[in-house]
Image (cartoon, grey):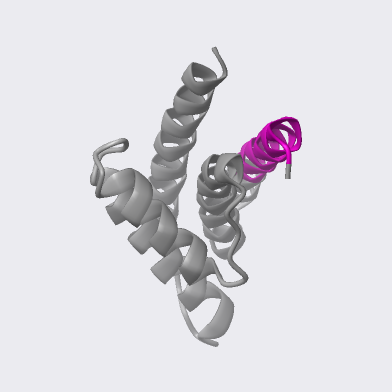
Amino acid sequence: MSDISRRDLSKYRLEQAEQCLKSSKLLYDNEDYKGAANRAYYAIYHALRSVIALEGVEFVKHSGNISYFRKEYIKTGIFDVELSDIITKAFTIRSGSDYDDFYVVSKEETRKQIENATLFYDQIKSYLADKSE
């Protein structure tokens, strides 16, 4: 994959992250907390994938992409360890919401997930902007 197509893929994934973040806010405003938490998770997931796209790295499973991001970008100090905690919490809530029949995510918990996804997205966007200069 050439550098240009990697940059294009990275940009596309960041746009996906932004759209998921917008969707999470709309769902939250309409009291669909499970849906909002799901979209907040995917905002985080697409954002981290936008970073690793620049390397041409791709894993089939979410856990592979997340593990690689943690190893290469959090453990190395490029991003704060706080982002790892955000990923963990969002993944746990998204998994519960999607796979546990009676899982309940509260309004407050969902609001926090959206805040965390926004913080995550903003840090990734800033990092990618610096990389493109």
Q: Is residue 60 magenta?
A: no
In the picture, measured across the screen, residue 110 lies left or right of residue 78, that is right
Give the overall secondary structure of the magenta segment.
helix
Q: Is residue 25 visible?
A: yes
Residue 48 lies, in percent from the top left, at: 50, 47
- In the image, what residue occupies the spot 42% across and 50% down? 113
Q: Identify whether 89 is placed above or below 95.
A: above
In the picture, measured across the screen, residue 94 lies left or right of residue 6, that is left
Q: Identify whether 126 is placed above or below 60.
A: above
Q: Quadrant of the N terminus?
A: top right
In-front residue for pair 8/90: 8
In the picture, measured across the screen, residue 68 lies left or right of residue 81, that is right
Q: Is residue 14 magenta?
A: yes
Residue 100 lies, in percent from the top left, at: 51, 85
In-front residue for pair 85/48: 48
In-front residue for pair 69/90: 69
- In the image, what residue occupies the spot 50% across and 22% down? 131
- In the image, what residue occupies the spot 63% across and 37% down? 14
Q: Which residues are magenta?
A: 2-22
- In the image, what residue occupies the spot 59% across and 42% down? 50
Residue 68 lies, in percent from the top left, at: 42, 58
Residue 13 lies, in percent from the top left, at: 67, 42
Query: To which quarter of the image does residue 15 belong?
Result: top right
Query: To which quarter of the image does residue 11 belong?
Result: top right
